[in-house]
C-alpha cells in the first residue's frame, strides 16, 4: 500500500516538474497560448501543446528550424519589435498547420526563397514595417488559401509579375509605404477575389492600361500619396463594384472624360492635393458619392453641369484652388447638397442663381476671396440657409438689394472686410440693427476713412458719416478718439495793408515770425504724413499676414460650419 502511494506521489511530482519546465522563463503559458516578452534567446523548450506563440521586444537575431520543431500544432506565430535579422531555410517547415504569421517591426531584410513552402494552410500573412528589400517571386507560390497579405512599410521598389498570381483566394493586399516606382500590366492578374488593394505612399508615376482589369470584386483602392500624373481612360472600366477610391496627394493635372462613368457603387473618393486645372461635365457618372473633396488643386473655373450626376452629394469642397469663375449652372442637379466650400480662391463676384435649385443647402463658405459685390439673385431658391461666410473679402458696402438676399441666412459672417464708412454704409447699419442675431456686430468695423478706422459700424449714425464724394473728415464719435489738430491761423497785418510807412524793422520782424510759423507747419505736416504711412503699412501687413495665415490653416482645425 505504501509502495502504491509512493509511486503515485512520484508521478504527481514528475507531472508538476514537467509542467513547470514546459513554460520557459520570461513567458506566460495559458492553455494553448504562450507569450514571451523581453527575451534575449528564443524560448526553449516550448510546451508541445502550444498553438499560439507571441514574442515581443526580444533581442534574439536568428530563427532556426529547431526552434519550432516541438510545436507541430502551431497555428499562430507573431514576432513583434524584435531584433530578428535572419530566418534560416526550413524554419517554418514543421509548422504545417500555421494559419497566421506576423513579422512586425523586426529587422529582417530578406527571407529564403521558399520560406512558406510547407504552409499551405496559411490564411493571414503580415510582414509589415520591416526592412525587406526584395519581393521574391516564389515566396507565395504554395499559399493557395491565403486571404490577407500585408507587405506595407518595407523597402520594396518593384513587384514581380508572378508574385501574386498563385493567390487565387486573396481578398486583401497592402503594398503601401514602400518605394514601388512602377507596376506591370499583369501584376494583379488572376486576383478575382481581391476586395481591398492598397498602393498608397509609394513612388508610382503612372498606371499601365488594364492593370486592374482582373479585379472584378474590388471595393477599395488606395492610390493616394504617390506621384501619379495621369490616369488611362479605361482604368476603372472593369472594377464596377468599387466603393472607395483614394487619389489624393498626387500630381494629376486633368481627369479623362468618363473616367468615373461606370462606378455606380462609388460612395467615397478623394482628389484633393493634386494639380487639377479643369473638370469637365463628363468626368463623373451616376454614383452614390456623398462627399467630394477637391481642395488644394489648381482649378480656375467650375463649369456648368460638372457635378450633375452626383445627385446624392451632400458635401462639396472646392476650397484653396484658383477659382475665378463659377458658372451659374455649376451646381445643377445637386438637390441633396448641404454644404459647399469655395473659400480661399480668387472670386471677385458670383452670378445670380449660382445656388439656385439647392433646397437642402445649409452652409456656404466664401471667405478669403476678393468678392466686392453680391448679385441680387445669389440665393434665389434657397430657403433654409444656416450660414454664409463672407469674411476677409473686398466688400466696401452692401446695398439694400444685397442685404435682402442675405436675410435668408440664420448667420452671416462679415468681419475682416474693408468697410468704407460713408453714407453708402447706412443700409448695412440699419440691416444689422434689424437683424442683431445674424451678425457678430462687434467684429464688423470700419476700415476707412482713417478717422473711423476700427469703429463698430452698428454704432455709427448718419451724422458720423461722410458724403460719398466728400474728403472732409466727419465728426468723431464719443469713443475717446482725439480730433486732428487744426492748422495754425495765417499771419494777418491790417496795418501793413492800410499803411505804407511801416518801418523796415517791423517788416523784417513780421517776415521772420511768418517764416517760423511756416517751418513749424511744414514739420507738423511731414511728421503726420510719415506717421500715417507707417501706420497704414503696418495695418496692411497685418491684414495680409492674417489672410495668408487663415487661408493656409490646418484643415482639421476649422469648425464644422465652415468645412475647409
Image (cartoon, rainbow, N blue to C red):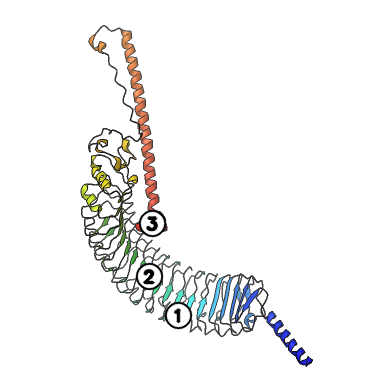
Q: Earlier in the sequence, mark 3 or mark 2?
A: 2
Do we see residue 412 in this rendering? Answer: yes
- How busy is the neighbourhood of tag 3: few (under 14 within 10 Å), some, or many (20 plus)? few
- Residue 41 percent location from the top left of the image: 66, 73
Q: Earlier in the sequence, mark 1 or mark 3?
A: 1
Q: Secondary structure at mark 1?
A: loop
Name the side, left or right, on which 307 lies relative to 547. Answer: left
Q: Secondary structure at mark 2?
A: strand
Residues at discs 1 and 2 in contact (Cβ within 8 Å): no
Residue of label 2: 245
Residue of label 3: 559
- How busy is the neighbourhood of tag 2: few (under 14 within 10 Å), some, or many (20 plus)? some
Q: Secondary structure at mark 3?
A: loop
Quarter holding the N terminus is bottom right
Where 492 falls versus 412 (above or below)?
above
Spatial CA distance of label 1 from label 3 is 41 Å
Q: Residue furthest right?
A: 2
Comparing labels 1 and 3, the label whose residue is closer to the camera = 3
Q: Residue at x 37, y 46 (%)?
A: 544
Q: Residue at x 45, y 82 (%)?
A: 169
Residue of label 1: 170
Instruction: Name the foreground residue: 155 vs 25.
Output: 25
- How busy is the neighbourhood of tag 1: few (under 14 within 10 Å), some, or many (20 plus)? many
Amino acid at each position: 500500500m505504501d509502495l502504491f502511494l509512493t509511486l503515485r506521489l512520484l508521478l504527481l511530482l514528475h507531472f508538476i516538474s514537467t509542467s513547470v519546465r514546459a513554460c520557459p522563463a520570461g513567458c506566460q503559458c495559458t492553455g494553448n497560448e504562450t507569450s514571451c516578452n523581453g527575451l534575449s534567446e528564443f524560448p526553449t523548450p516550448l510546451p508541445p501543446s502550444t498553438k499560439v506563440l507571441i514574442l515581443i521586444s526580444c533581442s534574439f537575431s536568428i530563427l532556426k528550424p529547431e526552434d519550432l520543431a516541438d510545436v507541430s500544432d502551431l497555428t499562430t506565430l507573431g514576432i513583434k519589435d524584435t531584433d530578428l535579422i535572419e530566418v534560416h531555410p526550413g524554419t517554418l517547415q514543421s509548422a504545417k498547420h500555421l494559419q497566421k504569421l506576423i513579422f512586425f517591426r523586426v529587422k529582417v531584410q530578406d527571407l529564403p526563397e521558399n520560406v512558406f513552402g510547407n504552409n499551405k494552410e496559411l490564411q493571414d500573412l503580415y510582414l509589415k514595417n520591416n526592412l525587406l528589400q526584395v519581393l521574391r517571386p516564389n515566396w507565395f507560390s504554395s499559399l493557395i488559401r491565403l486571404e490577407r497579405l500585408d507587405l506595407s512599410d518595407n523597402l520594396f521598389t518593384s513587384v514581380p509579375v508572378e508574385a501574386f498570381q498563385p493567390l487565387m483566394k486573396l481578398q486583401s493586399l497592402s503594398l503601401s509605404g514602400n518605394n514601388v516606382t512602377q507596376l506591370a500590366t499583369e501584376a494583379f492578374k488572376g486576383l478575382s477575389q481581391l476586395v481591398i488593394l492598397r498602393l498608397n505612399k509609394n513612388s508610382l508615376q503612372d498606371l499601365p492600361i488594364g492593370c486592374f482589369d482582373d479585379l472584378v470584386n474590388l471595393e477599395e483602392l488606395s492610390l493616394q500619396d504617390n506621384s501619379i500624373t495621369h490616369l488611362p481612360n479605361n482604368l476603372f472600366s472593369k472594377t464596377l463594384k468599387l466603393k472607395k477610391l483614394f487619389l489624393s496627394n498626387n500630381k494629376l493635372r486633368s481627369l479623362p472624360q468618363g473616367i468615373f462613368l461606370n462606378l455606380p457603387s462609388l460612395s467615397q473618393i478623394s482628389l484633393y492635393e493634386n494639380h487639377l486645372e479643369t473638370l469637365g461635365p463628363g468626368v463623373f457618372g451616376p454614383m452614390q458619392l456623398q462627399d467630394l473633396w477637391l481642395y488644394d488643386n489648381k482649378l480656375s473655373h467650375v463649369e456648368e453641369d460638372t457635378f450633375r450626376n452626383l445627385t446624392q452629394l451632400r458635401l462639396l469642397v472646392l476650397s484653396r484652388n484658383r477659382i475665378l469663375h463659377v458658372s451659374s449652372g455649376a451646381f445643377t442637379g445637386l438637390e441633396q447638397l448641404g454644404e459647399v466650400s469655395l473659400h480661399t480662391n480668387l472670386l471677385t463676384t458670383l452670378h445670380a442663381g449660382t445656388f439656385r435649385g439647392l433646397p437642402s443647402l445649409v452652409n456656404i463658405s466664401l471667405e478669403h476671396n476678393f468678392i466686392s459685390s453680391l448679385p441680387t439673385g445669389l440665393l434665389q431658391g434657397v430657403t433654409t440657409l444656416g450660414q454664409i461666410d463672407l469674411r476677409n473679402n473686398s466688400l466696401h458696402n452692401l446695398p439694400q438689394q444685397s442685404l435682402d438676399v442675405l436675410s435668408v441666412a440664420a448667420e452671416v459672417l462679415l468681419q475682416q472686410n474693408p468697410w468704407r464708412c460713408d453714407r453708402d454704409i447706412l443700409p448695412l447699419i440699419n440691416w444689422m440693427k434689424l437683424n442683431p442675431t445674424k451678425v457678430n456686430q462687434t467684429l464688423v468695423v470700419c476700415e476707412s476713412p482713417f478717422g473711423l478706422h476700427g469703429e463698430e459700424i452698428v454704432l455709427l449714425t448718419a451724422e458720423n458719416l461722410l458724403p460719398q464724394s466728400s474728403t472732409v473728415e466727419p465728426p468723431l464719435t464719443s469713443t475717446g478718439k482725439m480730433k486732428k489738430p487744426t492748422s495754425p491761423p495765417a499771419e494777418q497785418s491790417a496795418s501793413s495793408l492800410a499803411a505804407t510807412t511801416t518801418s523796415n524793422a517791423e517788416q523784417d520782424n513780421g517776415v521772420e515770425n511768418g517764416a517760423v510759423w511756416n517751418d513749424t507747419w511744414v514739420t507738423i505736416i511731414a511728421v503726420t504724413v510719415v506717421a500715417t504711412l507707417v501706420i497704414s503699412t503696418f495695418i496692411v501687413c497685418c491684414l495680409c499676414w492674417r489672410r495668408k495665415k487663415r487661408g493656409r490653416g490646418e484643415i482639421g482645425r476649422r469648425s464644422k460650419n465652415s468645412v475647409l
